[in-house]
Amino acid sequence: QVQLVESGGGLVQDGGSLRLSCAASGNIGRINRMGWYRQAPGKQREVVASITSGGSTNYADSVKGRFTISRDGAKNTVYLEMNSLKPEDTAVYYCNADRIVSGIRIGSQYWGQGTQVTVSS
């Protein structure tokens, strides 16, 4: 099993910034990609950004140029730097981890407990 613990959510004004952190522990060998999803009230969960152990990143179009995902391999921690936040970024943000081979998910997907991000207008 892999455990994911998020931190860093909160309330920020339109145009502000926040940084989320997610620390992984347990059987780290089962994962080689970590990322963030978000779910707003009444909406489906959507991917925000991901990063592989090799450093390859992907972003949702809605956050490109505003959010940056990074990782500290030594700490098994991934970060999401969120700038120029908008009210539509308000959601519960979930850390996610899995293992991919040639772009295909292999095995289980792991989730954190979620952290609330609220952007006021």
Image: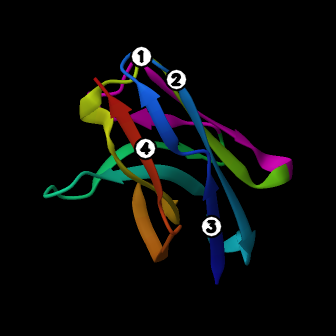
Q: Position of residue 54 (x, y in %)?
A: 66, 42
Task: Look at 32% across and 40% down and name the residue there.
Answer: 90
* Residue tagged 3: 4
Using the image as rendered, state which of residue 70 and residue 88 is in the foreground. Answer: 88
Q: Is residue 49 left or right of residue 112?
A: left
- The magenta region covers 55-74
Asked if residue 46 is positioned above or below residue 61 in the image, the reply reads below
Amino acid carrying label 2: it is Ser
Asked if residue 17 is positioned above or below residue 117 in the image, the reply reads above
Image mark for residue 84:
1
* Residue tagged 4: 117
Q: Are marks 2 and 1 in contact (CB under 8 Å)?
A: yes
Asked if residue 16 is positioned above or below residue 43 in the image, the reply reads above
* Residue tagged 2: 17
Amino acid carrying label 3: it is Leu
Pick whichever of labels 4 and 2 is earlier in the sequence: 2
Mark 2 Cα-neighbour bin, 10 Å: few <14, some 14–19, many ≥20: some
Q: Are marks 3 and 2 in contact (CB under 8 Å)?
A: no
Task: Look at 37% across and 22% down and name the residue there.
Answer: 64
User: How far apart are labels 1 and 4 at the CA level?
Assistant: 13 Å
Q: Of helix, strand and loop, which one carries label 2?
A: loop
Which mark lies nearer to you, 3 or 2? Answer: 2
Amino acid carrying label 1: it is Ser
Pick whichever of labels 4 and 3 is earlier in the sequence: 3
Using the image as rendered, state which of residue 94 and residue 110 is in the foreground. Answer: 94
Mark 3 Cα-neighbour bin, 10 Å: few <14, some 14–19, many ≥20: many
Pick whichever of labels 2 and 1 is earlier in the sequence: 2
User: How far apart are labels 3 and 1 at the CA level?
Assistant: 26 Å
Using the image as rendered, state which of residue 116 and residue 50 is in the foreground. Answer: 116
Task: Look at 52% across and 23% down and name the residue there.
Answer: 17
Mark 1 Cα-neighbour bin, 10 Å: few <14, some 14–19, many ≥20: some
Q: Is residue 93 left or right of residue 121?
A: right
